[in-house]
Image: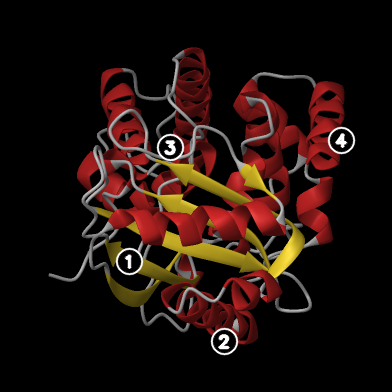
Amino acid sequence: MTSVSANPDLGAVFAEQRGHVWGLCYRMTGSRDDADDLLQETFVRVMQSPPRDTERAWRPWLIKVATNLAIDALRRRRRRPYVGPWLPSPLDSDGEEAPPAYELPPESGSPTEGRYELMESVSYAFLVALEALTPRQRAVLLLRDVFDYSVEETAEVLALSAANVKTTLHRARRAMHDYDRRRCRPDRELRARTRAALESFLLALASQDAAAVERLLSDDVLAISDGGAEFSAAKAPVRGRDRVSRLFLGLLRKGGGAPTFALGEVNGLPAVKINFGLSLPRAAPRGVFRVDIDADGRIYAVHVVMSTDRLSGVTFPQ
């Protein structure tokens, strides 16, 4: 970790620590834009009120500021009304064998003993699961189970007692139970299996083959679409093989457009970037379509992200 003199070069501190701070903020909020804002605000705060002891490592101070800013941002977001379901911001990770650019480099002192792997903790399935936690539970879980902070270090960051940290972590882990049953570890095998399921699903939809679509879906499949207040989307999650099948087949029949697809990768797993070409009122021009699969290769989650401010981390083909 970096120690600085009484007249620190904050530019150098920023260059060294920005990846770690941004990675925490993205995991805390699930939003690329929020993570950008929180990173900037963290360093503004540090410039305005630097730590008293500038001989000590900067990272603990930065993480403390960033984590508490992120908790405040989450609380504000949850107080604001939002039209329909909210989904995290997907991030491009095309062509990455190792964790993509928004991950922590090995030399950064990243933890290795956490309950969840670093790449897993930016998977879409993990970020969606985190939405069930309170802001403080989310912070404790990330610090303890992803970034491998000790109880005492976590207590220091959040100004909590050690007992409170342990209780909060227990509740957070309990809330992650459903995710833990289907852990998403984006390795090469899962990428290949997800790509195969995604391609088969798209082919079945394009062929209007309802039986083939249903065979690819689990009984309890859940489809979530985020169009925000901008675009038409299901106002609530759609659950069940028959209902999800009818939803997507119906959209294709009614759309009257000619969508174009580009298979890529977001958050470590294959996804489709779509230019919809729909003629429906308030139809989104583009979006990201992704799935999660179970141990049998059936799709148990479908996510469609269309809200413009949620797509800032994705590059679409022209």
Type of the residue with mark 4: His
At a point 61% along the width and 26% down the height, the residue shown is: 135
Q: Is residue 51 visible?
A: yes
The kind of secondary structure element at disc 3 is: loop
Residue 153 in the image: state x and y as whole percent: 69, 36
Asked if 83 appears above or below 201 in the picture, the reply is above
Label 1 close to label 2 by CB (< 8 Å): no
Identify residue type, mark 1: Lys
Q: State the CA–CA distance, disc 1 to disc 2.
A: 17 Å
| Residue occupying image coordinates x 22% and y 65% | 316
- Mark 1 or mark 2: which comes first in sequence? 2
Residue 307 placement: quadrant: top left
Mark 3 lies on residue: 55
- Residue type beneath disc 2: Ala
* Residue designated by label 4: 170
- Residue 192's mark? 2
State which tag comes first along the sequence, 1 or 4. 4
